[in-house]
Image (cartoon, rainbow, N blue to C red):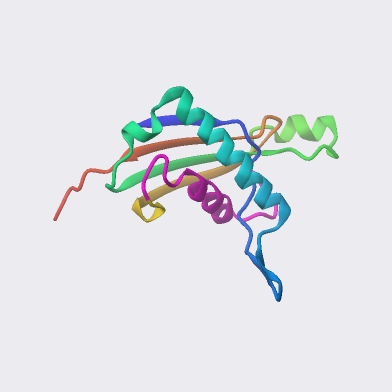
Amino acid sequence: MIKETFNIAPVPASRPRVTRYGTYFPKRYTLFRKQFDELLSNLTYKHNVCYTERNDGLVSVRLDFYVQIPKSWSKKKTKEMEGKYCSNNADLDNYCKAALDGLEGRYYENDKQVAMIRARKFFSTNARIEFSITHIEEAHE
C-alpha cells in the first residue's frame, strides 16, 4: 500500500469546450492539471516510489478530497464546517476523474486498472488530496 498527501486544492474535472477554433478545457481545470503534474513530477524524483511500485494489475484506490472553505464564510461557520462532509455543487465523480487522470502513468499504467474506488470530500481550511493505492490480488479465475 502506498499513501500520499498532495498539498493542492482539488478541482473537479470539466468537460472540454468545443468551438470552431478547437477544443479546450476551462482555465481553472487546465491550471490544476499543470500544477498537479508538476507536484507529482517533484514527488517522483524525491521519493522514487511511484515507478518502483507500479504494475499492470488491478488496484484499489482511496481518495479524500479536502475542499477549501470559502473565504466569504464567517469565522463561526468556518470553525463549524471544518472537517465536515462537503456539500458544494461539484460532483464527487468529477473530483475523482481529475485526480485519477493526473495519477495515471505514475501509480498505475492506465486508470482502467482501478477496480475499486472509495472517495470522500470534506470542507477544510487546508485544501489537499489524500491518496492511497493497494494492489488487488485476483481471488478467483
Q: Quadrant of the N terminus?
A: top left
Q: In the rendered picture of this protein, how many numbered marks are placed on residues?
A: 0
Q: Quadrant of residue 67?
A: top right
Q: Residue furthest left?
A: 141
Q: Is residue 73 above or below residue 46?
A: below
- Residue 67 seen in the current view: yes
- Residue 87 seen in the current view: no
**Is residue 102 within the magenta segment?**
yes
Give the residue drawn at x 71%, y 36%.
81
Q: Residue furthest top?
A: 46
Give the residue drawn at x 69%, y 55%.
89
Q: Residue furthest front?
A: 21
Q: Is residue 13 left or right of residue 135?
A: right
Give the residue drawn at x 67%, y 29%.
126
- Of 5 and 110, which appears nearest the observer? 110
**Is residue 8 within the magenta segment?**
no
Q: Quadrant of the C terminus?
A: bottom left
- Of 65 and 101, which appears nearest the observer? 101
Give the residue drawn at x 74%, y 38%.
69
- In the image, which residues are magenta? 85-109
Please provide percent x and percent y for residue 88: 70, 50
Q: Is residue 32 above or below residue 50?
A: below
Please provide percent x and percent y for residue 39: 57, 34
- Of 61 and 24, which appears nearest the observer? 24
Q: Quadrant of residue 54?
A: top left
Q: Is residue 105 left or right of residue 57?
A: right
Q: Is residue 62 left or right of residue 60?
A: right
